[in-house]
Amino acid sequence: MTYKNRNDWWLVAAFFLGVSASLGAGLYWVGVPMLLLFALCVYPQKYETTDRGLLIRATLFQRLIPYGVITQAEPCTGGRSLALAIDGIAIRYGLGSELRISPADPGAFLADLASRAPHLKRQGHGLVLALS
């Protein structure tokens, strides 16, 4: 199943105003890199649960995370994220790797992930590694 990303409209507006102000003031050395970063963050991202694993398609990269290496998936706030959103889901996998995403429907995304990764169990609002 494919899930679209979510961007917080107020965060997009604030970023856009900052870029506009820099370009309007003639600070092209600041405004142009910010404009490129803005375009990369706003570009539609997709999160897809496939038979092989969780496929994350962002602007400059595509990453496949096999379900077997995912150790945790839980709601998070703030921090580094691929989208212009404050709230999202932190996917922890492997030996200390983490990726933060922001699906438009986090509840449906976590339910789908739980059905495809039987080694994860529900704990609170997220999924954690089930120790048998």
Image (spheres, rainbow, N blue to C red):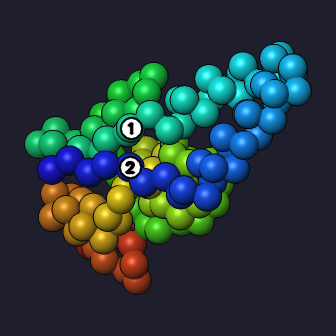
Please determine whether, in this image, residue 48 is positioned above or below residue 117: above
Location of residue 89 in the rendering, given as x and y in whole percent from the top left corner = 45, 60
For the view shown, which residue lies furthest in the top direction? 29
The answer to whether residue 35 is left or right of residue 61 is right
Give the mark nearest the N terminus, 1 or 2.
2
Q: In the rendered image of this protein, does residue 33 appear above or below residue 7? A: above
> 10 Å neighbourhood of mark 1: few (<14), some, or many (≥20)?
some
Percent across and percent down for residue 43 are 44, 34
- Where residue 8 appears, as percent x and y from the top left, is 53, 57
Please state, as top left, top right, bottom left or bottom right, where the C terminus lies in the image: bottom left
- Residues at marks 1 and 2 touching, judged by CB atoms closer than 8 Å: yes
Q: Which mark is residue 125?
A: none
The residue drawn where x is 54% and y is 37% is: 41
SS category of the residue bearing label 2:
loop
Please tell me which residue lies in front, 70 or 41.
41
Residue 5 is marked as 2
Instruction: Name which quarter of the figure residue 18 lies in.
Output: top right
Residue 5 vs 111, above or below: the answer is above
Residue 74: x and y in percent read: 44, 67
Whether residue 98 is visible to the viewer of this picture, yes or no, is: no
Q: Residue at x 81, y 35 (%)?
A: 21
Q: Is residue 3 visible?
A: yes
The amino acid at mark 2 is Asn
Name which residue lies at 36% across and 27% down. 62
Q: Residue at x 51, y 46 (%)?
A: 83
Where does label 1 land, which residue?
44
Q: Of residues 113 and 82, which is closer to you in this image?
A: 82
